[in-house]
Image (tube, rainbow, N blue to C red):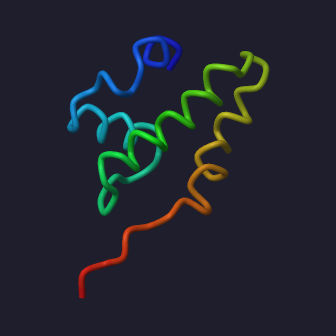
Amino acid sequence: DRALSRLGPHQLSDSELRQACYLRGISSDGLGVHQCREWLSQWLQVSSSLKESEVSLLLHTVVFLSANYPHVPSHH
C-alpha cells in the first residue's frame, strides 16, 4: 500500500484500480471509476499511516470505509 500510495491511484488503469479495490475488500461492481479511485485513496491514507502494531485496525478499516459508502442504484 505504501508503494501504491507513493505512485498514486490515478496512475492505475481502470482494471488495475478495480482489482486493487477488490483485493482490499470492496466490490467495484456498481461503482464508477471515480468512486473506486476515491475509496482506494481513502484506504491508502489509512493503511499507509498505520504502524505494524496496528494491523488489527487495518483489518477493520474495510468495514469502516465501506459501511456508509454510497452505492450506485441498481437498474431495475
Picture residue at 25% right of the left edge, 31% below the top? 16
> What is the total number of numbered labels drawn onto the structure image?
0
| Image position of 14 with respect to 48: above or below | below
Q: Residue at x 73, y 36 (%)?
A: 57
Residue farthest to the bottom?
76
Q: Residue furthest right?
A: 53
Q: Quadrant of the C terminus?
A: bottom left
The residue lying at 30 percent from left, 37 percent from top is 19
Q: Residue at x 74, y 16 (%)?
A: 51
The picture quadrant where one finds residue 73 is bottom left
Question: Is 41 displayed left or right of 64 in the figure?
Answer: left
Above or below, 9 against 14 in this view is: above
Is residue 58 or residue 76 the one in the foreground?
76
Measuring from the top left, give residue 30's x and y in whole percent. Answer: 31, 63
Image spot of residue 3 (x, y percent): 46, 11
Tell me residue 50's x, y (percent): 71, 22
Q: Position of residue 74 (x, y in %)?
A: 31, 78
Q: From the viewer's side, name the closer residue of 41 and 1.
A: 41
In the rendered structure, the answer to whether residue 15 lies left or right of residue 54 reads left
Name which quarter of the figure residue 4 lies in: top left
